[in-house]
């Protein structure tokens, strides 16, 4: 699942396709800009077997009727469900005074949609998109990193940073576990926070600089290869010496085995538990979004040139 998009060519409108296999009187240009049969205009209308046969013949013809496969001038993959959600979240941090039209379009995207973006809307947002591509920075995000600078998680914020709210690192209070005392980890501002799970979570630990000791002997193994073990973890506040031992997944990151895989059939996942870590912040750079923004630029430019809409699918 995910989001793709295309802009249809104008070859049929311009009369530069091969000869269609059905009379031209049965062909119209549909809302996407692609030619379709007259009965395709009303998908709820019942068609006869003969009409259905004609439709199949016609749609087979559109696959190679001109120089553009499937009569699509531009066809782009925008991303999977998570990628589109990330793009939508990043867009929420754009300056509405400079990128208002573009923000409205991007915030309306989802990983599963079937919709049209009219050419005039794409045309209006095109200068904003081109201006964004010339930028260097597109906001910032907090990161979790080891004390030597090695990155554990480089994207803690899916939206503009909220320095007050608790940002959960998991598991959520609703997570089902065999351990009643399993805690929830998270971030508030630049503090690492441990709290109990439940209807009214209680704070158990808070620190800016943290040491972590993972008790391997206490670990309960994963149920599937996608689960991480739960064990006893001791967190220590480096500045005050305060410490707490809790049952947790711990702060960890999945490493790749030498063959590049994230899972070994004999050894399982290679989990790295950093001894010390802290919350920092980094700039989110436009080049991180370069490929998807470039795809959108090609789509918007094609819509501007043809007058056909961007078709999200």
Image (tube, helix red, strand yellow):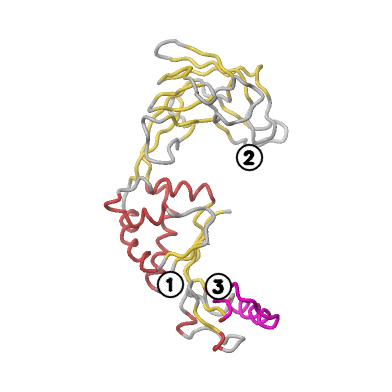
Q: Is residue 7 left or right of residue 265?
A: left
Q: Position of residue 166 (x, y in %)?
A: 43, 29
Q: Earlier in the sequence, mark 2 or mark 1?
A: 2
Marks 2 and 1 sit apart, C-alpha to C-alpha, by: 43 Å
Rendered image: mark on residue 111: none
**Which numbered mark, 2 or 3, is in the foreground of this view?**
3
Rendered image: mark on residue 308: 1
Q: Earlier in the sequence, mark 2 or mark 3?
A: 3
Toward the top, the furthest residue is 241
Rendered image: mark on residue 69: 3
Toward the right, the furthest residue is 266
**Which numbered mark, 3 or 1, is in the foreground of this view?**
1
Residue under pointer 2: 261
For the residues bearing labels 3 and 1, Cβ distance under 8 angstroms: no
Q: Is residue 229 left or right of residue 169?
A: right
Query: Looking at the image, which is closer to me, 164 or 41?
Result: 41
**Which numbered mark, 2 or 1, is in the foreground of this view?**
1
Above-or-below relation of 55 to 232: below
- Tell me the residue at 70%/80% (across/down): 49
Above-or-below relation of 99 to 16: above
| Rendered image quadrant of residue 179 | top right
């Amino acid at each position: 699942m995910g989001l793709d998009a295309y802009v249809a060519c104008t070859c049929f409108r311009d009369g530069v396709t091969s000869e269609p296999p059905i009379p031209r009187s049965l062909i119209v240009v549909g809302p996407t800009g692609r030619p379709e049969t007259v009965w395709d205009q009303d998908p709820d209308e019942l068609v006869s077997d003969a009409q259905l046969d004609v439709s199949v013949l016609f749609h087979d013809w559109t696959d190679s009727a001109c120089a553009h496969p499937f009569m699509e001038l531009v066809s782009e993959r925008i991303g999977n469900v998570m990628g589109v959600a990330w793009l939508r979240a990043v867009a929420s941090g754009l300056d509405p005074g400079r990128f208002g039209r573009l923000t409205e379009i991007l915030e309306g995207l989802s990983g599963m949609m079937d919709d049209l973006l009219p050419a005039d809307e794409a045309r209006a947002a095109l200068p904003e998109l081109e201006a964004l591509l010339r930028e260097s920075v597109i906001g910032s995000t907090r990161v979790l990193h080891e004390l030597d600078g090695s990155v554990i998680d480089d994207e803690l914020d899916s939206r503009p940073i909220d320095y007050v709210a608790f940002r959960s690192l998991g598991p959520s209070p609703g997570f089902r576990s065999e351990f009643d005392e399993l805690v929830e980890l998270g971030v508030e501002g630049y503090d690492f926070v441990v709290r109990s799970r439940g209807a009214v979570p209680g704070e158990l630990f808070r620190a800016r600089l943290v040491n972590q000791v993972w008790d391997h002997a206490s670990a309960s193994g994963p149920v599937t290869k996608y689960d991480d073990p739960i064990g006893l973890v001791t967190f220590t506040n480096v500045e005050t010496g305060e410490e707490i031992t809790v049952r947790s997944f711990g702060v960890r990151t999945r490493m790749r085995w030498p063959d590049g895989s994230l899972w070994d059939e004999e050894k399982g996942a290679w989990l790295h538990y950093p001894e010390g870590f802290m919350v920092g912040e980094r700039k989110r750079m436009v080049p991180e979004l370069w490929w998807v923004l470039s795809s959108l630029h090609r789509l918007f430019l094609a819509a501007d040139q043809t007058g056909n809409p961007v078709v999200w699918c």
